[in-house]
């Protein structure tokens, strides 16, 4: 559930105060360079600094000064649904490099979006072969397609098979819904022992819990609930999911008219609908959290099983990869409690990092103009990205 044309990562718009941040990071970069040959960790620190400076709207972008221009190729590969399409970014070389498969999720920015290109370019310069998996259904129809989990498995297998990829250093990542589906895919027995790391940003932990929070407009965490101003895109994706679960075309058309096109439909029409359609209608009428929970339990078993199948909550025990997750505290598309629950579920396994930010609008930069807040948050992002870029160095 990602905002239309969202910018997927760390793209912070022009502000002269970022010049100061850039100078600070450049100082760190120079210090890292001085000990570059003495410690392997310094190499990762240097590349992380270069990456951060390249992604930020900084007047200093030394990453492009000392690295080759990446190639960007469109590739196709077999999937159970036919031919998959992806963009691959890489620095041409004779050696094999670390790789990462990325999925931007529902209604995401397209392949030619400036910030998508910038992210692919910067990660490639940092040492990765970067593959963006594109979903024609989720990208255009504002929904969640469970079949994309299988497509991600096939895409990861294809990426590892490339002659320029080091098969022992391949990971996955995703944003919003894309992050959740990437986690589920990473737990698949066909690839879970080959996924070195998984990184998600702004994802959900349990789809049923998320749906109940959207339906009621109330988020909950550790027994507490509070009003949640749900973003309209999130409501749209939820409405699409619920309406598409109906079997009868006439009922789907009626509920689309009522809830997607704001048509005027008499409530007396409810008596002519199937039990399934009546439940969906009531869920879209913003019930209380308790009412939503009771309604959801009366939905068809097949639909509830499908919801469980797209939930990381049902798969975390099977993950073998290092897990790194991020979420913004004030997220209006997916509440931060979702990733906090994911973090709690993973806390005891080791090899895990959770970074909570305060300057993003879901996965887009925001956060106002507090200079020291930006410095603090930039440091968080550096520490988080270091754990990823370390794989490539």
Image (tube, rainbow, N blue to C red):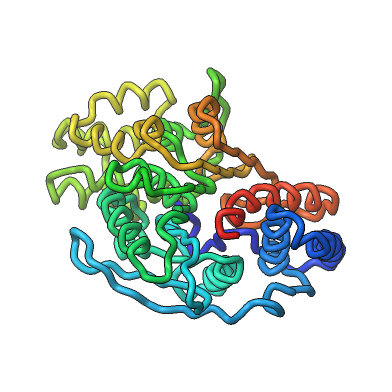
The residue located at (42%, 52%) in the rendering is 178
The x, y position of residue 2, in whole percent, is 47, 54
Q: Is residue 386 above or below residue 119?
A: above
Q: Does residue 169 appear in the picture of this structure?
A: yes
Q: Quadrant of residue 276?
A: top left
Where the C terminus falls, by quadrant?
bottom right
Residue 272 falls left or right of residue 378: left
Residue 75 falls left or right of residue 355: left
Report the front residue among 307 and 59. 59
Q: Is residue 176 above or below residue 301?
A: below
The x, y position of residue 91, in whole percent, is 53, 76
- Residue lying farthest front? 38
Report the front residue among 295 and 11. 11
The residue located at (44%, 56%) in the rendering is 170
The x, y position of residue 203, in whole percent, is 48, 44
Q: Does residue 264 appear in the picture of this structure?
A: no
The number of numbered badges drawn on the structure is: 0
Q: Quadrant of residue 25?
A: bottom right
The residue located at (79%, 64%) in the rendering is 33
Report the front residue among 196 and 139. 196
- Residue lying farthest top? 223
Residue 63 falls left or right of residue 178: right
The residue located at (53%, 46%) in the rendering is 202
The x, y position of residue 30, in whole percent, is 83, 65
Q: Is residue 327 above or below residue 172?
A: above
């Amino acid at each position: 559930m990602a905002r239309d044309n969202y910018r997927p990562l760390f793209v912070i718009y022009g502000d002269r105060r970022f010049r100061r941040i850039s100078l600070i990071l450049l100082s760190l970069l120079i210090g890292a360079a001085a000990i570059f040959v003495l410690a392997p960790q310094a190499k990762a620190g240097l590349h992380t600094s270069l990456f951060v400076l390249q992604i930020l709207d900084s007047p200093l972008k030394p990453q492009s000064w000392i690295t080759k221009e990446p190639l960007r190729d469109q590739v196709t590969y077999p999937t159970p649904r036919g031919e998959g399409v992806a963009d691959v970014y890489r620095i041409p070389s004779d050696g094999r490099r670390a790789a990462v498969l990325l999925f931007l999720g529902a209604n995401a920015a397209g392949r030619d979006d400036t910030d998508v290109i910038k992210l692919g370019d910067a990660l490639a310069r940092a040492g990765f072969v970067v593959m963006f998996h594109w979903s024609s259904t989720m990208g255009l129809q504002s929904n969640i397609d469970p079949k994309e989990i299988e497509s991600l498995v096939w895409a990861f297998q294809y990426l590892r098979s490339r002659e320029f990829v080091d098969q022992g250093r391949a990971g996955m990542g995703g944003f919003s819904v894309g992050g959740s589906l990437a986690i589920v895919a990473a737990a698949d027995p066909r690839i879970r022992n080959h996924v070195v790391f998984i990184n998600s940003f702004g994802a959900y932990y349990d789809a049923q819990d998320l749906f109940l929070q959207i339906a009621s407009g109330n988020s909950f965490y550790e027994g507490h609930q509070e009003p949640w101003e749900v973003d309209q895109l999130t409501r749209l994706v939820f409405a699409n999911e619920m309406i598409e679960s109906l079997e009868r075309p006439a009922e789907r058309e009626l509920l689309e008219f009522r809830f997607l096109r704001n048509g005027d439909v008499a409530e007396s029409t409810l008596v002519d609908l199937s039990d399934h359609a009546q439940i969906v209608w009531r869920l879209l009428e913003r019930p209380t959290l308790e009412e939503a929970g009771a309604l959801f339990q009366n939905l068809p078993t097949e639909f509830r099983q499908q919801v469980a199948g797209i939930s990381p909550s049902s798969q975390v025990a099977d993950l073998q990869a290092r897990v790194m997750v991020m979420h913004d505290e004030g997220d209006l598309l997916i509440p931060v409690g979702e990733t906090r629950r994911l973090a709690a579920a993973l806390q005891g396994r080791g090899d895990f990092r959770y970074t909570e930010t305060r300057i993003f609008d879901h996965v887009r930069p925001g956060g106002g103009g507090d200079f020291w807040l930006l410095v603090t948050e930039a440091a968080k992002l550096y520490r988080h990205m270091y754990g990823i870029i370390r794989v490539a160095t």
